[in-house]
Amino acid sequence: MPLSWLLGACALAALLLPPAFAQPQGHAVAVGPTGDYEIAVAHDGRTRSALVHVPDRVAEETRPVPVVLNFHGGGGNARAHRDYVRMDALADREGFIVVYPNGTGRLDEMLLTWNAGLCCGYAMTEKVDDVGFVRALLAALALRAPIDTARVYATGLSNGAMLSYRLAAQLSDRIAAVAPVAGSMVLPERRVDDVVLAVPGKRAVPILHIHSIDDKRALYFGGLGEPFPFTNLRTRHPNAEEVLYRWVAFEDCAPKPVVREERRGVRGGATEAHTATLYVFGGCRDGGEIALWKLAGAGHVWPGGRGDYLPRVLGPGTDVIDANEEMWKFFKRFTLPPARS
């Protein structure tokens, strides 16, 4: 590994990760059925890991509970992502388990990525089987917690959002619905003279896409995003609306959306000029739905996440909507249909 690459990577990690998470952490040991712990999963010749948050109220439940898989962005890790998105509080209130998996990389828990197809980094170039890892992770989790296998949902930021799309396409027998944030689908279907995005799915998976038109990194309307900090690396992003319309056609939804809701930032606040519009494609087959929270004013961010999180890198945060609240309202309406014989 060239020294220049290593120095650049370490500098980038220092920028991307808050100080408390800049160094790899020791593995926690589960001490009971609830609380926070880390699990290790052996898959495809690697030992993979994930942080798990099990609310106290789960111990009182008489039936299995839902699970939300929440994937970090490219260059991050599970600990930093958990601190940024702040989903644990909602899980405590609503009674679902949150799992924050770690991607793969060369530097232990730093600069981790997901293989979402045409992105990103180490996971893509090494052809890491992240879909298989998620399947193995769910199997391992089921041995430790009372999970409802019909109510497993996936979300993620940026590269993590891209992976949630891949899971919708390639793991629809385990994932009931997805809510990608600030990232779109980058699965390729190779043609003789071109590469086009396709929907190779098997089931009409409900999708709630959350994205700002002012995102400078995962461009909403497609194209090359800004260079990754301290590098010349740039990622080509698809047009988020074109991707959604591919899913709309695949799921036989109404061809045009209806505007379900419009919001503006709090008057007099830092996000006063921010807007959010909810578009919904109804009538999808198998009782599904495709929806889009289209934001303006926000950057490459998790709406409702920590507002002070890397604004120079990600752009302005926003509270015009709370992504956690909106996706949970969406998720809890859907369950995985029974397997067909």
Image (cartoon, grey):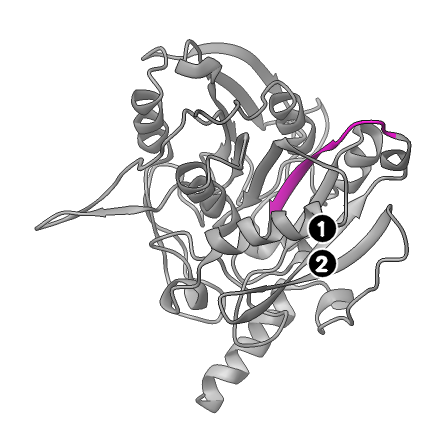
Residue at the front extreme, as displayed: 341
Does the image show residue 83? no
Does the image show residue 5? yes
For the residue pair 192 and 300, the one nearer the viewer reads as 192
- Secondary structure under tag 1 reads helix
- Secondary structure under tag 2 reads helix
Which quadrant holds residue 232? bottom left
Q: Which residue corresponds to mark 1?
A: 82
Residue 283, given in percent of the width and then of the height, sits at: 42, 9
Residue 318, given in percent of the width and then of the height, sits at: 64, 36
Residue 147, given in percent of the width and then of the height, sits at: 71, 37
Magenta residues (range): 61-70
Left or right: 326 as drawn, with respect to 74: right
Left or right: 324 as drawn, with respect to 238: right
Total of numbered circles in the picture? Answer: 2
The structure residue drawn at horizontal position 27% and vertical position 38%, both measured from the top left corner, is: 198
Q: In which quarter of the image is the C terminus?
A: top left
The structure residue drawn at horizontal position 45% and vertical position 36%, both measured from the top left corner, is: 168
| Up-down relation of residue 135 to residue 149 (above or below) | below
Residue at the left extreme, as displayed: 192
Q: Which residue corresponds to mark 2?
A: 79
The structure residue drawn at horizontal position 65% and vertical position 38%, both measured from the top left corner, is: 68
Q: Check residue 265 for magenta coloring.
A: no
Q: Whole-Å distance between the Cαs marked 1 and 2?
A: 5 Å
Mark 2: amino acid: Arg
Q: Do the residues under discs 1 and 2 have CB atoms within 8 angstroms?
A: yes
Mark 1: amino acid: Arg
Q: Quadrant of the N terminus?
A: bottom left
Which quadrant holds residue 306? top right
